[in-house]
C-alpha cells in the first residue's frame, strides 16, 4: 500500500499532510518553509520517496464562483513543475475555505496568534487531504452501490 501526500501551497510555506497506508486518515507533517523552487521540489521528491507516496494532492484555491484566479494559476504552474520532478500522479482538490476553516478550529482551541500561524498551514493540508480521502471513498462506495 502507498500513501497520499497533500500540499497546501503558499508563497512562504507549504503545509503538508500524509495519509495512512489504508488512505483513510490524514495526519499533518511539519510545515516546509519555502526556499527556491528547485529546493522545494527536491524536498517534496525526497518526501515522496521516503514516505512511499503513491499520489500527491495539491489544494487548488478556486474563487468562490469556482473560477481560477491568480493564485489558482500559480498553483497549477507549481503542479506542472512538481509533475516533472515526481513520478507519481498529482491531483488538485478544491480547497476553498480550508485555510479559514483551519483558522476557525485553531481559534476555538484558544491558541495564541503565533501558535496558530505555525499550525494553520499543516491543518489546512490535513483538511485538504481528509476531504480528498472522504470524496474518493464516497465515490467508490457510490459506485459499488450502483453495481450491487
Image: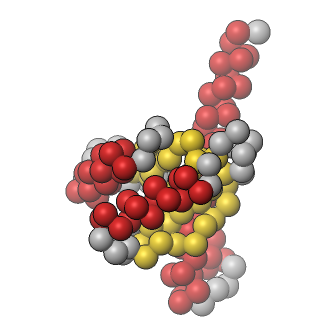
Q: Position of residue 96 (x, y in %)?
A: 44, 54
| Camera-side residue of 86 and 8 | 86
| Camera-side residue of 33 and 145 | 33
Residue 100 in sight here: no
* Outermost top residue: 148
| Camera-side residue of 94 and 30 | 30
- Quarter of the image that includes the C terminus: top right
> Could you tell me which residue is drawn at 36 percent across and 44 percent down?
83
Which of the 4 quarters of the picture holds residue 92? top left
> Horizontal placement of 128 versus 133: left or right?
left
Q: Position of residue 94 (x, y in %)?
A: 45, 47
Tag count: 0
Residue 92 in sight here: yes
Which of the 4 quarters of the picture holds residue 142? top right
| Residue 121 against residue 73 in the figure, above or below | below
> Could you tell me which residue is drawn at 53 percent across and 59 percent down?
47
Amino acid at each position: 500500500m502507498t500513501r497520499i501526500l497533500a500540499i497546501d501551497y503558499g508563497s512562504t510555506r507549504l503545509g503538508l499532510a500524509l495519509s495512512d497506508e489504508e488512505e483513510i486518515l490524514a495526519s499533518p507533517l511539519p510545515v516546509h518553509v519555502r526556499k527556491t523552487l528547485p529546493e522545494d521540489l527536491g524536498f517534496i521528491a525526497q518526501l515522496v520517496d521516503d514516505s512511499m507516496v503513491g499520489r500527491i494532492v495539491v489544494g487548488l484555491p478556486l474563487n468562490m464562483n469556482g473560477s481560477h484566479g491568480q493564485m489558482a494559476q500559480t498553483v497549477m504552474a507549481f503542479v506542472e513543475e512538481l509533475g516533472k520532478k515526481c513520478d507519481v500522479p498529482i491531483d488538485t482538490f478544491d480547497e476553498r475555505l480550508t485555510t479559514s476553516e483551519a483558522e476557525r478550529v485553531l481559534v476555538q482551541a484558544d491558541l495564541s496568534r503565533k501558535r496558530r500561524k505555525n499550525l494553520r498551514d499543516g491543518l489546512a493540508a490535513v483538511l485538504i487531504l481528509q476531504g480528498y480521502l472522504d470524496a474518493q471513498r464516497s465515490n467508490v462506495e457510490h459506485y459499488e452501490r450502483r453495481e450491487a
